[in-house]
Each structure stands twice: as structure tokens, then as C-alpha cells.
Image: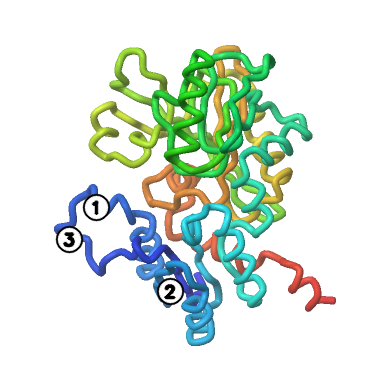
Amino acid sequence: MKRRRVLLVMHEELMPPDSIEGVPEEEIYKWQVEWDVHSALKRAGHDVICLGVKDELGPIRKAIVEHKPHVVFNLLGHFQGITAYDAHVVSWIELRHVPYTGCNPRGLLLSSDKVLSKKILSFHRIPSPAFQTFKRGRAVRVPKRLVFPLFVKSAAEHASIGIAQASIVQTENALRERVAFIHDTVGTDALAEHYIEGRELYVAVMGNQRLKVFPIWEMTFDNLPKGAAPIATSQVKWNVAYQKKIGVNTGLAKDLPEGVENRICRLAKRIYRALGLSGYARIDLRLDANGQVWVLEANANPDLSREEDFAESARSAGLEYADLLYRIMNLGIGYAPAWKDDADG
């Protein structure tokens, strides 16, 4: 393993402490990925500089000039509070001719725009639930082609923001109420899609040109309250106590119908390429009772915590955490943006 100079860029409020001794689990959970990546890179012998970013690019420029990193390890999920702006930060780093980890700017923009990405998947005949967008400030008119139940979520935000059991609606009145909630509380357009009852599956993909698909992962619930749907709500995603209460588990998907695993593997690669992704991504899927696979969304630069789905799936395929991070760095260094093509020419 070659020693790298790494500029680890993260949100200012998620800068981890030097030690987690005595820190409550609920507190660690907020910056778990930052802690895991930083500590693993340090233990592997890399020269790591942590940089907390708020709403200015100047500190990144200063750190690049001073430390001359081999790669910028990008852990930003938004910029200035706007999800889509993380792509602009990556564009700026690319303009500096500095390699970075994760997805390229166009792939980030396409995957973060859930409406546009669904249209692209539809063009490529990739099975995805029927949907409708509801713009802020406009009356909610339900097209006849939409069949209840519907699942209502933000058209822009990730990490299960705004998702709850109430996101599944059965009537037009409930739809209007949930759309208004997304508009007023989350502050984005709303996306309503046909709710697919079935198994919650995730598949991790890594690569630029040559793609590696890791084993399929599944989220299950041991103690889900009666009448509750098995969905990844905000509580399920971020509340440690609630996770334990309802018995949230993720692990290798077992007893999949014959042929489904190979179908999902091929589908994941098609989605990755259709959206122009690079680096690493997670594809969220649903498998219904008839064995039909439905694509919910693609997540560029997903959670890299040591115990989260992406890293665990890679580990099950024989790729340990430090090696996974090293491979992600090498993919960033090996990615060929336009400036490299021009330099080669």
C-alpha cells in the first residue's frame, strides 16, 4: 500500500475529536463516518490533514496549496446547506487539477436530482415506480395514472430527510398533506411515487470504467410495530435508540429468487453508467412478491462508515475497510477528467 498525502474534507460541524473515549454512542453517530475514515487512514500510515468546511472555498484552496495532497478525500454531502452544491465544490477541485475521491460533478448532479435521474432511468427502460413531481407554490393535482398507495419524499434531499411512516399515503387528502409537509418543513419540491411493498435491498458499486458490484445487502426489522411499513425513515436512519427498539438489521440478502442476484448485478451496472457515476455509489432497490426488481434511487458517495452497508458489503466480498478506502483513493487518482485528457493530448 503506497503512502498518500490526503486532504480529508468534511463539514465543519462534523469534525471528530482526537479520541472517542467516554463519548456517548449517540454523539459519535453524528460524525461516525468522519471518525472511521480518518482513523483508518491514519492507522494505514497515510499523511492525513483534516479540514472542516463551512461555506467558503478559500480554506480548501489554502490547504491544497500548503499540503499538496495526492488526493482530496471528499466527505461533503452538501455545501451552504444545499445538497446540489456539493457537485460545484467537486467541480472547483477538478478545476484545480487535484484528484478527489467519489463521484464526478455531472454524476453527482444527475443522481442528486431525483426527478431527472428517474427520467433518465425511464429512457433506458430501467424499472422504476411511476411518479409525479409537485412543485412548491403550486396546487396539488393528482394525475389519474398514479395509483395509491404512494410514497412521498423530497425531490432533492437524501439521508431519509423528511421520510416517516406518514410518507406512505392512501388518499388524495393524505397526499396533499404530505406534499405540504415536504414543501413547508423540508423546503423542497415533493416527489410522489407508487409505493412498492417488498424487501428493501441495497447494492454497492465501485469503479470508473471497470465496475465491481458487491454482494446485495438487505434491511430488515425484528420488532416493527404492527401496521408499520418496513421503510428507512429518518428515525431508522439517525436515531440509535429507535434502531435498537425496532430491531433494525442490515446484512447479506438471503433466499433471493433464482436469477434475481444476477439481474440486480447487471441492473446496478446499467444504472451506474446511465447516470455517469464514478468512484463509488449505492443503488436502492425494492423486490416485490412477484420477484420484480424496482429501482428507487442511486446514491453517489454513500455513507462510508465502517459498519454501514457499503463497507460491510465490501468486507463480505473480502475487501477490508482500510483496503476499501485505499481503493477509493486510487479510483480518484486514476479518474480521467477533461483536464487530464487535454494534458495527454
Instruction: State which mark lies toward you, 1 or 2.
Output: 1
Q: Is the C-beta separation of discs 1 and 3 under 8 Å?
A: no
Residue with the mark numbered 3: 21
- Amino acid type at circle 1 is Glu
Side of 157 where 114 appears, left or right: right
Is the residue 166 above or below the residue 25 in the image? above
Whether residue 90 is visible to the viewer of this picture, yes or no, is: yes
Mark 2 against mark 3, which lies toward the viewer? 3
Q: Which residue is mark 1?
A: 27
**Viewed as shown, does residue 299 lie left or right of 262?**
left
Is the residue marked by circle 2 packed among few (<14), some (14-19), or many (20+) residues within 10 Å?
some
Q: In the image, is 209 to the left or to the right of 26?
A: right
Q: Please, what is the three-letter code of the amino acid marked with disc 3?
A: Glu
Residue 335 quadrant: bottom right
Residue under the image location 33 percent in, 35 percent down? 235
Local secondary structure at mark 3: loop
Could you say which is closer to the camera, residue 177 or residue 241?
177
Indicate which disc, 1 or 2, sits on the residue closer to the N terminus: 1
- Residue on which disc 2 sits: 46
- Which of the marked residues, 2 or 3, is nearer the chain's N terminus? 3
Q: How far apart, in angstroms, are the residues tagged by discs 1 and 2?
A: 26 Å
Q: Residue at x 55, y 34 (%)?
A: 190
On the image, the x and y values in percent for residue 192 come to 57, 27
Mark closest to the chain's N terminus, 1 or 3 = 3
Q: Residues within 10 Å of mark 1 (few under 14, many from 20)?
A: few
Marks 2 and 3 close (CB-CB < 8 Å): no
